[in-house]
């Protein structure tokens, strides 16, 4: 790993309020959205009323989250701060907001959330999938994309002085588009320049995570500092997850709290939490426990606790007891929620 050019950040975690010591993080969620707009591109600019969540509709919002306009729009800083406070009260320390270009990152909003809630917030650099991006961004070459991402980590993102502490989630479709391939190459080059870890939103195909890792490694990325997310909907055979982890990548089960059989983006046998835990147990038994991360990927209003959902504290309050019931010891739980996130978020760590 090349030394980062930012000597202040080296050996620290870059939060939206500035660098902090890695030991300060506490239990960490590596893949969340506090503020974002993932409204489908076909409808995001239409002047449609926002559907309201009520006791009569809350189940359907969870079962069919994409059918309710505005559900994928998290823009209320005050509500997000209250939700983050509930996470802190459940024992949480840090939330990584992986909202990248195209889905409306809000650096100043994240600063306000961190200040109000008392948790550490880390912001992601780079760009989401092609359908969410404007023509000017899609035309950028790899070199320009690299320069943007490096600047977001070292100087500030989206016209602010608020710095990113991780690269991604880098958005990838299936099949991968030419822009998305350039975005991956830029992420790898930015990692070499800054020492930041990379987190990936893979395309929805069994081959996608392996293709992505091939591209990143060809550009010199350290697979041990690459998180490949969404195992819950991408690699449903745990043998494939084990194979990806054996390549060195950190594999992330980040749909914790989603317990519905219906997958809103296609036909898929979505696991529930105990199934995720069983798959993770297999990874530990294969000697790969240091390459596992867990999170919720909250990106809809219906998953917020104040609107009838499970909230950011679900893993700590509900999934961790399930893990203990199924044989996990505290050191293993800490490895996923404290040790691995701490290593990944420390700039320049190996």
Image (tube, rainbow, N blue to C red):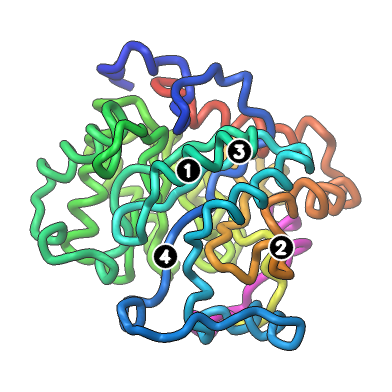
137 displayed left or right of 214: left
How crowded pointer 1 is (Cα within 10 Å; few <14, some 14-19, many 20+) is rated as many
Q: Nearer the viewer, residue 113 or 10?
A: 113
Quadrant (top left, top right, bottom left, bottom right) of the N terminus: top left
Horizontal and vertical percent position of residue 259: 72, 71
How crowded pointer 3 is (Cα within 10 Å; few <14, some 14-19, many 20+) is rated as some
Horizontal and vertical percent position of residue 94: 60, 36
Q: Which residues are magenta?
A: 263-280
For the residues marked 4 and 3, what is the alpha-carbon distance in whole angstroms? Answer: 22 Å
The answer to whether the residue labelled 4 contacts the one labelled 1, judged by CB atoms less than 8 Å apart, is no
Quadrant (top left, top right, bottom left, bottom right) of the C terminus: top left
Between disc 2 and disc 1, whose residue precedes? 1
Which image quadrant is residue 222 in?
A: top left
For the residues marked 2 and 1, what is the alpha-carbon distance in whole angstroms? Answer: 19 Å
Tag in front: 4 or 3: 3
Where 16 falls versus 245 (above or below)? above
How crowded pointer 2 is (Cα within 10 Å; few <14, some 14-19, many 20+) is rated as some
List the residue tagged with mark 1. Answer: 110
Checking the image for residue 37, the label placed there is 4
Checking the image for residue 163, the label placed there is none
Confirm whether the magenta stretch covers residue 274.
Answer: yes
Res 211 visible:
no
Residue located at (77% from left, 37% from top) = 91
Residue located at (35% from left, 83% from top) = 43
116 displayed left or right of 164: right
List the residue tagged with mark 3. Answer: 116
């Amino acid at each position: 790993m090349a030394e980062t050019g930012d000597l202040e950040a080296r050996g620290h975690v870059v939060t939206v309020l500035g660098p902090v010591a890695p030991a300060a993080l506490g239990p960490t969620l590596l893949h969340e959205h506090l503020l974002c707009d993932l409204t489908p591109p076909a409808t995001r600019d239409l002047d449609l009323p926002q559907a309201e969540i009520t006791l009569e509709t809350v189940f359907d919002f969870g079962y069919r989250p994409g059918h309710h306009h505005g559900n994928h729009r998290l823009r209320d800083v005050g509500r997000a701060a209250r939700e983050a406070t509930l996470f802190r009260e459940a024992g949480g320390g840090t939330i990584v907001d992986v909202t990248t270009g195209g889905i409306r990152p809000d650096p100043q909003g994240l600063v306000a959330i961190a200040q109000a809630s008392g948790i550490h917030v880390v912001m992601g650099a780079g760009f989401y999938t092609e359908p969410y991006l404007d023509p000017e961004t899609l035309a950028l070459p790899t070199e320009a994309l690299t320069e943007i991402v490096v600047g977001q980590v070292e100087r500030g993102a989206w016209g602010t002085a608020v710095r990113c502490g991780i690269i991604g989630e880098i958005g990838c479709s299936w099949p991968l588009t030419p822009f998305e391939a350039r975005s991956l190459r830029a992420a790898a080059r930015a990692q070499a320049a800054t020492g930041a870890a990379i987190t990936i939103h893979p395309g929805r195909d069994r081959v996608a995570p392996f293709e992505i890792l091939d591209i990143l490694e060809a550009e010199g990325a350290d697979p041990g500092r690459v998180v490949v997310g969404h195992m819950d909907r991408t690699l449903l055979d745990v043998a494939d997850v084990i194979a990806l982890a054996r390549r060195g990548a950190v594999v992330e089960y980040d749909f914790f709290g989603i317990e519905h059989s219906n997958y809103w983006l296609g036909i898929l046998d979505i696991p529930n939490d105990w199934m995720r835990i069983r798959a993770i147990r297999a990874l530990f038994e294969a000697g790969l426990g240091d390459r596992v991360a867990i999170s919720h990927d909250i990106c809809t209003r219906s998953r917020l606790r104040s609107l009838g959902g499970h909230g950011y504290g679900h893993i700590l309050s509900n999934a961790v007891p399930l893990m203990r019931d199924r044989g996990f010891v505290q050191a293993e739980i800490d490895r996923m929620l404290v040790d691995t996130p701490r290593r990944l978020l420390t700039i320049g760590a190996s």
